[in-house]
Image (spheres, rainbow, N blue to C red):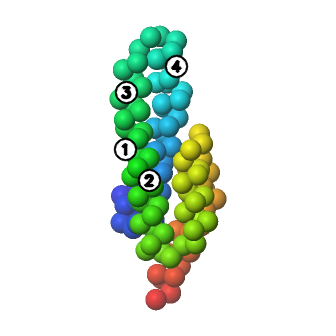
Amino acid sequence: MFSLLQTTLGRLRVIGWLEGVSFLVLLGIAMPLKYFAGEPGAVRVVGMAHGILFIAYVAAAILATIEYGWKLRITAALIVAAFFPFGPFIVDARVLRGLEEESARVARAK
């Protein structure tokens, strides 16, 4: 896990996972608590955490785009995916993991 934090791409992946989990907690736990149990406090706390993680995810995506020279469509896919439940996990599996392996191959070849 800590080796992921050594690169911009690794940090993007970790933030994406955290953002995705916070979104699922917001939708699956906090919102039902608010509307079915009359407990709005969970939405305030989880919603704030999710908002901060979303901003961090977008910033990390932009930084990774600048550092790795990605095309705009990759960045757009990352950001659009964050608006959907499970989106960051799907983008991580289908896009980011492959890009990380490719960048590791390039680094080893140097």
Q: Position of residue 25 (x, y in %)?
A: 48, 31
Q: Under tag 4, what secondary structure?
A: helix
Instruction: Please report contact status of discs 3 and 1: CB closer than 8 Å, yes or no.
Output: no
Per the model, the C-alpha gap separating discs 3 and 4 is 13 Å
Q: Position of residue 84 (x, y in %)?
A: 60, 42
First of labels 3, 1 by sequence position? 3
Relative to 24, residue 14 above or below = below
Amino acid on which the number 3 mark rests in the picture: Arg
First of labels 1, 4 by sequence position? 4
Per the model, the C-alpha gap separating discs 2 and 4 is 25 Å
Q: Mark 4 packing: few (<14 Cα in 10 Å), some, or many (20+)? A: some
Front residue of 105 and 89: 89
Q: Residue at x 54, y 27 (%)?
A: 28
Residue wearing tag 1: 52
Residue wearing tag 4: 32
Q: Under tag 2, what secondary structure?
A: helix
Front residue of 56 and 98: 56
Residue wearing tag 2: 57
Relative to 71, residue 32 above or below = above
Residue wearing tag 3: 44
- To which quarter of the image does residue 9 belong? bottom left
Q: Residue at x 52, y 19 (%)?
A: 32
Q: Residue at x 46, y 81 (%)?
A: 107
Instruction: Please report contact status of discs 3 and 4: CB closer than 8 Å, yes or no.
Output: no
Q: Residue at x 47, y 10 (%)?
A: 37
Relative to 97, residue 48 above or below = above
Q: Position of residue 54 (x, y in %)?
A: 44, 47
Q: Under tag 1, what secondary structure?
A: helix
Left or right: residue 108 compared with residue 5: right
